[in-house]
Image: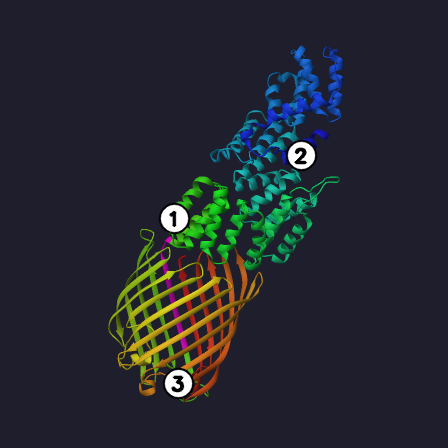
Amino acid sequence: MGRAIRAARDRRDAVPVPHRRFGHPRFHVLSCALSLAALTTPQLVLAAPDQSIRVQADALLAQERPAEALLVVERRLAVAPDDDDAFRLRVLALAELGASRLAVDAMHQRPQLFADHERERIEGDAVARAIGWGRVEPESPDARLDESRAALVELERLQRDAPRRTNWEANRLRVDALSALNHLQRHEQVVAGYQALLDAGIEVPAYILGTVGDSLVALRRPEDAIPVLETVIAHAPGDVNARILLGYAFIETERFDRALPLFETLAASQEAWPRHAGANAGYENWDRYSADLNHALAHSYANDNARAEAMLQSQVAIGPNNAGLQAAYGAVQSRRLRPEAALERFEMARTLAPQDRDALAGRVGALTALDRIDEARDAIETLQLARPEDPRLDRVERDLDRHRGVQATLSANRGRSRPRDGGGTSISPFGSRDGGWALDVRSPLLADRWRVGVFAHDDWADFIDGRVRHRAAGVGTWYRHDRLGAWATLGSASGASRGATWTLGADWRFDDAWRAGVEIARNARDTSLQARRLGIDADSVTVSAAYAPSETFALEGRLARLRYDDGNTRDQLGLDATQRLLTRPHLMVDGLASLYTSRGSRGDTVGYFNPERDASANLGLRFDHITWRRYETAFQQRLQVMAGPYWQRERGTQWVPSLGYRHLWRRDGHELEYGVAWSRPVYDGLREQRLAFDVELRWGGAR
């Protein structure tokens, strides 16, 4: 029983050296054991009787002193190489020392000396050791999985060609196979093998359940992983890795109420520099590092990226040469909408550890967000070569393909405006009723930078003298690479106004925070339909700028001039600001502020709403609640409340409230959004009540 327990312990902890380039561990085991035994074992008589040798070696093995036993039998074999008893004891001593491969090689020289259970145990130990060593970082990245593959082949050969005669050893091989399969990222086979053990009524040992839990999490089956990992922790409360995996299983089932306290408690339970009794100094506790790192990432997954960044910053300052830490910091920068900063961290991590899978995968997303698609394709090829077994690879490939593929937007809206008292005729620039639809379809990326496509839209409004409709359709081309974006469209209009319509625009990204753009439009779509009913069109020039240093704050400005055919020019200036006020795993509250002012050169001398001067200021709150989420699929509700004064020259100031409620569905980068909005705007001093509904489907990952 003692040997069985030690064998199980060996399978868990069989990673005694950090790198394979120093030679195979079995030679170190033998040489170190003999050196230690020579220093500690009393002087022995080399020509002692056979019986004395056996008794002495057996006694040392029983006392768990295999190194000394090995020295005894080695001295005996030096003078009597044909001594079968000494040879047999030598093999058993090697097995107890963990030199399982040497033990197997020696045992096969005289297999008749060993009982079936001894032979099977020693062969099983060798396979277990090989599986453990397969997880050690190799000298050459190309050989990273070679030992695990070889160990699995050897294990399957034993199962096929030399079926175990003892149930315990047969089950042991099946259990050990799960570890090798997990390292090879063959998670489906891990779970299938685990289920087969359960179906056979075999009690699966606790030490392998963490591996099973890891595969279940990798397969996105967190509900199944939770009870497995809880069993591991019940047997081994100090298993830090199992606790971290359990925390992620809770996160992936949206149980942040359980995940965040778990990570916090785990980090607090680990001393950074524990000290053994009597030691002059403490030692590095890498479990504390793992707990702190994953505690920070858990907050990021809970939408609190600002806190995650602050937690990781202190760690990066301490360990700038830690590749995993740099990659984690890069992932948080990506979630903070800082792709340049994220890419810098991923490159640092890759410099420190060229095979770091988090850095390799993160680079693809960062380069895609930066619209450097040719480099993103190269990055994904690097990931495919370095980590072809990584379960994230398929998702990374799909995300890039979605971004490069067809992009489409289909939207529709309906609205109704009425005077405050419900009587009379609406003077709203939207008419008493209004609506429309729009379609924009763009091709997959051409040469990683270009798209071509078509667009069409139809807008209408009912006024006192009838319905006014404006239609347009045409083609366009769009260019985007790195910092520069440019576009041009050409179409024809029909309905209330006819003729050519075109747009020409460009924007520039200065850095992660700043972006600015300009667009010129002929027969602009946002021309008032009140003006179109009179046969008046307008051209426009729009300059925009946006400052968004993170996902929690954004400031956008827009300056536009519309030049109407009747000689009227209308200048508009708008500013919108968003500031995150509250972040919870499923609830985000943002404060909103907006300022708007405009002027019309001809004032109220025209036949459409055209204030000579007007302005507004609004403050509000936006509540976003993630009602349901399953990885890339989610349902989100949004409630927005705003109010503020509206001023119009010679018409005074009045307060205008607005309320909006929306649903947003996301699935694999595609989005469906719809909502209803209510407001009480004021036009020329007369208050109206407006109710509107809109819906939009967005297909594709590029925005």
Mark 3 highlights which residue? 426
Q: Whole-percent x and y of residue 81?
A: 65, 11
Image quadrant containing the C terminus: bottom left
Image location of residue 257, percent across then percent down: 63, 58
Q: Is residue 418 above or below residue 180?
A: below
The residue at 53%/39% (across/down) is 189
Q: Is residue 414 magenta?
A: yes
The stretch drawn in magenta includes residue 498 = no
The mark that comes first in sequence, 3 or 1, is 1
Q: Quadrant of the N terminus?
A: top right
Q: Residues within 10 Å of mark 3 (few under 14, many from 20)?
A: many
- Dot 2 and dot 3 residues touching (CB under 8 Å): no
Give amino acid for label 2: Arg
Residue holding disc 2: 9
Identified by mark 3, the residue type is: Ser
Viewer-nearest residue: 147 or 229:
147
Q: Quadrant of residue 584?
A: bottom right
Q: Is residue 579 above or below residue 612?
A: above
Element marked by disc 1: helix
Closer to viewer: mark 2 or mark 1: 1
> Where residue 626 sits in the image (x, y, percent)?
54, 63
Q: Nearer the viewer, residue 541 or 642?
A: 541
Chain-order first, disc 2 or disc 1: 2
- For disc 1, the marked residue is 375
Q: SS of the residue at dot 2?
A: helix
The reply to whether residue 1 is visible in this rendering is no
Q: Position of residue 103 (x, y in %)?
A: 62, 22
Q: Residues within 10 Å of mark 1 (few under 14, many from 20)?
A: some
Q: CA distance from mark 2 to mark 1?
A: 46 Å
Q: Which residues are magenta?
A: 404-415
Depth check, mark 3 against mark 1: the one in front is 1
